[in-house]
Image: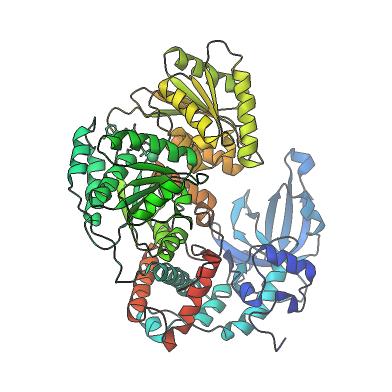
Amino acid sequence: MATLGLGDSVARLPGVGPKRVADFRRLGVETIEDLMMLWPRRHLDRTSLTPIYQLQVGTSQTVRGQVVQVHDRSRTSGQSYLTVRLSDGTGFLDLTFFHAAWLKRQLQTGTHLLVSGRVDQFRGRLTMTHPEYELLQADQQPRLGLIPVYPLAGDLKQRFVQDLQARVVPRWAPQTVDPLPPGIRQKESLEDRAWAIVHQHWPSSWEEREASRRRLVFDEFLRMSLAVLWLHQTDPQVGAVALTVDNPLLTRFLGELPFVLTPGQEAAWNEIRADLMRSVPMARLLQGDVGSGKTILAALAMLAAIGSGLQAALMAPTELLAEQHYLLFEQHFAALGVRVILVSGRSKRTEEREMLQSGLPLVAIGTQALLSDDVDFGRLGLVVVDEQHRFGVRQRAQLGDKGLYPHMLVMTATPIPRTLALTVYGDLQVSQIEGLPPGRQPIATVHLAMKDRRQAYLKVMEAVRQGRQAYVICPLVEGGEEGQGKAATLLADGMKQIPGWRIGLIHGKMSAMEKSRVMDEFRRGAIDVLVGTTILEVGVDVPNATVIVIEEADRFGLAQLHQLRGRVGRGSYPSICFLLADATTAQSEERIQAMVESQNGLELAERDLQIRGPGEVLGMRQHGVAGFQLANPLKDLAWLERARQTARQILAADRTLAQEENQGLRQWVVEALREALPGHVLH
Ligand code: ADP
Ligand code: MG
């Protein structure tokens, strides 16, 4: 064991065979270092033993004793529970376990036990319900103090992991290098890293655990902040071009709008406008709930670029939405003499590509394919990203690789809390469109069991009779868009049997032309009910549609459901959203519940984060740039700000982290970026 290093596999540790190696791998643990970073989920307070006669009702305490009686009550009471009477010579304590008849095998008369839990009183007896317990040998000294409780996988046992960590952590923690220069440590009053690692596992008090956590959380944030800022360091020589915001194009466009901007749009536009006038590239996230009118602000920003003689790109998450945007902008901008082109992933129209390359001022609309290698922009002044809050580090790096530092506006209806936004985008400013355009009606949201789906379709019928339109969204099925497309086809075929309904079908496997034909018919009102897949999720804007039925809604994510619901309620008619679902898991039930209770995108985003955790929400792996083990980006905001501040200072003094004392930090950045951007070459 003596020669093992941090990078060696846990397989080299005594007691860790192939089965356990596999179990550990499921927890993300390969090396000894990983094992040390397998942090306890929590600690059990087992700081002292209390004799039974001194137990105080209402407090949490730990008792050592011997089982003197076991009683299986499953038969007598109809309820299944087990009572176990414990004695330590000073008194009796009754332990109750519900639905745990299997415990009988472990907890036999004579067994020595250590139990921790809340002491209660029942009919004059001291009791504990479902205490934490540990079996002891007769002569075994129990481990006291704050006991770590680790995440487990496979056949790993808590006790085994505790013992292993007790051997591994104190031995290898001192080998870790502390990347933090001592000056910073002192300034932030942080503990030494090795100390913090040891005490995260085995603190001797809650205060120690907190001090340790503070250091480790700071490290996680600092590592992430350095990586993100590093990536966004632009060469000071190549700033963005300051735009002429109040140009005649823009003024004309505003003058011809059939409505006035809402105060919320106005406020957000003023913030964007101020950024565009500067030669520092704008990096702004525009949050506004579904239907709040973000597209108009994108149009204004794009006209600022065009009017300044530059190009503007608009990226949408799907081809369908790109096309919708294309049609919309084409219609509005043609009158202004502004050229709009659609750059589709498939189209190899060299003519369009040449126009882009030539630097001609125009608006290019497409999906992320706009960033692909064979698309060159001659004079890109602005990039607008619609409905992709995942757009971030990677894409910024792609643009940077091309030597482009345009102004950037990211728009989303699924806001992510500011802390998370910072982690993904770096120095990102946030604008929020408060409120909705006037006249909007709230969308009633109704959850129906699958067997009651008829009710939803009756409502569809009623709406169609009144001249309104409806969407029906097909369940997500294995096999992605293809399977979902089939389900949609089936459902549409079934519905075509209903007399009087004009049914349309749309899914991702249809050709682009077919799709836009169907959308066009729906928009014109030639289709009453549009059956479709999740390609309808974002952006589609048909104010006459007032009912949306989501089949097997439990299969969709919360953000997705909220977006889908946003397809209705866009005009002045009252709208309704049916979620058809027999909730199958606790999570899906929570999502449906959240949908019924809230229509506020921000609120839902936060609940989503609680339900799923930040890693998944951002679509990043646990260990990615946003992969925090201990830090909670919702709660540790103050520490995030400090770490970012520190990261900024470090990079200001040493842009490339070349100094001797920053080598550990440089290593962190390299690792973080390797995890987040596989294949990306660092400059
Ligand atoms: P989202 O924020 O979801 O992208 P859109 O930009 O698609 O919303 O706008 C939704 C609808 O609201 C569109 O039909 C748009 O024309 C309309 N709209 C936008 N701004 C206003 C406004 N200030 N007054 C009235 N209607 C507006
Ligand atoms: Mg939109």
Across and down, in percent, residue 353 comes to 42, 50
Colour pattern of the rendering:
rainbow
Quadrant assignment, res 583: top right
Q: Residue at x 48, y 82 (%)?
A: 664
Instruction: Describe residue 371's horizontal placement relative to residue 334 as left or right.
Output: right
Position of residue 224 relative to residue 314, above or below, is below
Quadrant assignment, res 467: top left
Instruction: Describe residue 552's horizontal placement relative to residue 71 as left or right.
Output: left
Across and down, in percent, residue 41 comes to 58, 63
Position of residue 473 relative to residue 502, above or below, is below
Instruction: Describe residue 389's horizontal placement relative to residue 489 as left or right.
Output: left
Quadrant assignment, res 34: bottom right
Front residue of 441/465: it is 465
Q: Residue at x 40, y 32 (%)?
A: 541
Q: Residue at x 62, y 49 (%)?
A: 122
Front residue of 607/472: it is 472
Position of residue 315 relative to residue 110, above or below, is above
Across and down, in percent, residue 680 comes to 51, 67
- Image quarter hosting the C terminus: bottom left
Q: Residue at x 48, y 71 (%)?
A: 213
Q: Is residue 236 visible?
A: yes
Where ligand 2 lies, by image quadrant? top left
- Image quarter hosting the N terminus: bottom right
Instruction: Describe residue 157's horizontal placement relative to residue 268 as left or right.
Output: right
Residue furthest top in the image: 499
Total of numbered circles in the picture? 0
Q: Is residue 387 visible?
A: no
Across and down, in percent, residue 266 comes to 22, 43
